[in-house]
Image (cartoon, rainbow, N blue to C red):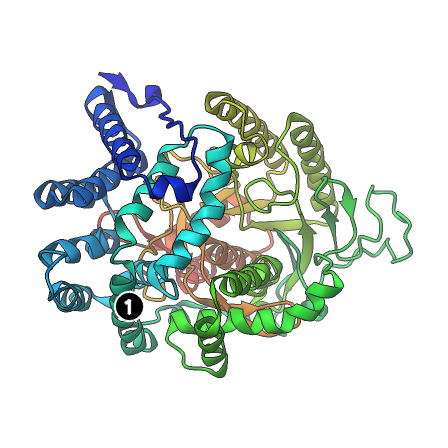
Amino acid sequence: MGTGKQLPVHTYPIKDSLAVLLADEQQVKTLKEQLKHDLITDLYGYEIHDTAALKTHYRILGDLAFYDGDNAKSLAYYDTLRALEIKPAAKATSALVKRSLIASGDPAAANYISNFRNIFTKSVTAIPYISAASSLQRIRQQYANMTAAEFVKIAASDLNPPIAAGPLSVRNVDYVLFLFYEMHDFDKVSKVVSAVMDSLTMANARNQVNIWPARDLELPPGKPYAPVVICVFDAGTDISLFKDRLYTNPKEKVDGIDNDHNGYIDDIHGVAYDLQENKDSQLLPPLTAQQEKLYPNALRLMRGNGDEEAGIESADYHYYKDEIAKANVVQRDSLWALINFVGDYAHGTHVAGIAMRGNPYARLLTVRFSEDVGFTPNGKSPCVETELKVAQNLKDLVKYWKAAKVRVVTMSWGYFISDYQNDIQKYNPKMPEPEQKALAIKLWTMRKNALYEAFHAAPEILFISSNGNKNSNSNIDLRYPAALDLPNMIGVGSVNSAGLETDFTATGNKVTIHANGYLVESDAPGGKKILLSGTSMATPYIANLAAKLIAVKPSLSPTEIVRLIKSGADVSADGRIKLVNPKKSYNLLTASK
């Protein structure tokens, strides 16, 4: 038996467009049988240690058996998939829709959909909402506001480019099979899932347990505490919202000149880098005139989208629901583009709001980066030249942070190998997949080494980074900088308002601590509040605590801060969840003074 590292890369040559392919039943069936053969061969021929890869194999095999009408085999695969899940919520919701469909009987029967409604409703309501909110909402979003025709139309733009570029990957063939086999009943199923999940959300979301107010630590003003410079290293921050608590470079002024000769121009409150990794001075990404015009409406859509998931029937919620309901597929795509635009534009400001909350002694220094690996579609392919430039910029930043006496750097970002491989494939679709992966590993390793060298050179600064939103094992699917083995690094995972794991958070030993990362309210540029979810929101919560501990005792080293944060955490019985408790960590500090 081979090892997991030797798993072959399966590809499937397709010459026709998606429309032609979906009309060719025999070709689709041949693809299905080939995919089934390849995945079963992998399982029996290789020792696969990566649970994410195993789960993908068993999930697809379960779906293929479902398409064949072999319900017993399908359930057996889904049971194996469920056994691989370690999060209680993931176990409870694993293949939930498919299991309900299988239990509903013959798809050709007149009572099939009514059976499905009853079985799915019973299955969903049996799951404690408090423990599985983000997992249930993920299922809701997979079916919300979408018809089969719209699904196929969107899929054409997703799949026709890779079809034209060369052989399809397992992921894309899985997508094709989903379209061929599931669109027939999709509209009926979607209506049931959406209605049941909407009802569930409105009945439960507003009554959620929230453990965080009792844990939150707020430092009152007027105490003999020290100012603490905290850097939000992100995609840009609206510093006007924090104007009374900004780091200020006393040797610089806004005149287009590098007055203090530190290599940065007009760096009063921080620095920035553009898409080409060149130094810049705009701490919030500049908007075009069109984007400025669209922003208020886009922000309202974003607020309504967040309120929908939170079960809040606000005016923005109704506006969002109305706009989505009356939009056709093209218009709906534009609406989602606006929501995603706000999510990207507001990200750094939202992070800063969390990091600065309840701390009058915090001083915000902003570093804006714009590079596009795994993030935006309008840069260029990852390359060695860019990585060399990034490495130098990181060295420059360390010097800058030291001069500014930065104590904490919060980083709600990171890099998987897959981020590089996806971008390389996007810009170099005809490059053979093994070459794409080899280049991705090379560039990802360069980035890892650059981050390590830079942060290792600043042992007095505490670096805090998110472990990502891939629901992956952080011991295997390494994400840097969170996975760096440094005493001054903390990797963060996400839980919900009740302190239970979100469906997207990473697991494994690289997750040092967990904080609230689900439907967290904070600032957007301009000052309005929005709800966002992700380990991006959990990370600045830890930075917030670290800065407060330093304000109380400035002599604390990063190692001592990490120890206080970990010692104050509430650890789950199985040891996997380390739930941050700011008040406990603060009490440990003050008791030792």
Residue at image coords 39%, 32%: 169
- Name the one closer to the observer, 241 or 541: 241
Question: Looking at the rendering, which quadrant does residue 515 occupy?
Answer: bottom left
The image shows a total of numbered marks equal to: 1
Name the residue furthest top. Answer: 1
Q: Residue 499: x percent and y percent?
A: 33, 61
Q: Residue 502: x percent and y percent?
A: 34, 56
Residue at image coords 51%, 72%: 303
Side of 186 where 423 appears, left or right? right
Side of 368 where 416 appears, left or right? left
Rendered view: 558 above or below 446: below
Side of 110 where 502 appears, left or right? right
Query: What kind of residue is marked 1?
Result: Lys
Residue assigned mark 1: 191
Regarding residue 408, the answer to whether it shows in the image is yes
Disc 1 packing (10 Å; few <14; some 14–19; many ≥20): some
In the rendered view of the protein, which quadrant contains the N terminus?
A: top left
Side of 227 where 340 appears, left or right? left
- Name the one closer to the observer, 360 or 273: 273
Q: Residue 548: x percent and y percent?
A: 55, 61
- Name the one closer to the observer, 266 or 528: 528
Regarding residue 485, the answer to whether it shows in the image is no
Q: Which secondary structure, mark 1?
A: helix
- Name the one closer to the observer, 48 or 70: 70
Q: Residue 136: x percent and y percent?
A: 29, 62
Question: Looking at the rendering, which quadrant does residue 14 occupy?
Answer: top left
